[in-house]
Amino acid sequence: MMHDHAGFSSIFIIQYSLFFFGLLLQDMAASSPGYIILFDGVCNLCSGSVQFILKRDRQKKFLFGSLQGNTGQQYLKKYHLPANHFNSFILIEGEKMYTRSTAILRMCKHLGRGWTLMYGFIIIPRFIRDAFYNLVAKNRYRWFGKKEACWLPTPELKSRFLD
């Protein structure tokens, strides 16, 4: 009878240890960035969008990288996209990559607060959403301008950028 009690105690200790280890991992995951946004670093609209996200990302869920930078180029290669493919907003969630309107809507979903409501537009078929996205992307330099070099973050924001 004593042997059964010892087995129960061992299982109880192991389950409790796993439970607390799981809570620790959840806490670490919640405090570390979980999403990567890749953007056209010379596009005024894109840089403005990044600054918009930075101001509203209070939980610091997002990291950023320009498509022209080393990290952006590595992701383009990883997902078999052309190295000069700068006309898309890209969101990386774990191993999944989202582009164009889907990336923007998923970013809004993760941004939280009232921005989560924007994710409701996901019900619009992607070909319609992306047609509008493509129109803006095609004209973004003409409508919003273009920088000669990528936007550089302030020293306080540098930790949020991949390169």
Image (spheres, grey):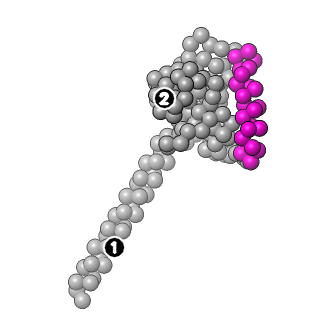
Which residue type carries mark 1?
Answer: Phe
Residue at the spot 68% in from the left edge and 23% down from the top edge: 45
Q: Residues within 10 Å of mark 1 (few under 14, many from 20)?
A: few
Image point (75%, 43%), residue name: 125
| Disc 1 target residue | 12
Mark 1 element type = helix
Q: Main secondary structure of the magenta part?
A: helix
Amino acid found under the numbered disc labelled 2: Lys
The x, y position of residue 31, in whole percent, is 48, 45
Q: Residue furthest bottom?
A: 1
- The residue that appears at 76% across and 32% down in the rendered structure is 132
Q: Would you say residue 106 sits in the magenta stretch?
A: no
Q: Residues within 10 Å of mark 2 (few under 14, many from 20)?
A: few
Task: Please state the horizontal and vertical placement of residue 114, each as a whole percent of the image.
Answer: 71, 45
The span shown in magenta is 121-143
Q: Nearer the viewer, residue 26 or 56?
A: 26
Q: Secondary structure at mark 2?
A: helix
Residue 3 rendering spot, x and y as whole percentages: 22, 83
Looking at the image, can residue 67 be seen? no
**CA distance separating discs 1 and 2:** 47 Å
Which of the two residues, 105 or 9, is positioned nearer the viewer here? 105
The residue pinned by badge 2 equals 77
Residue closer to the observer: 141 or 28: 141
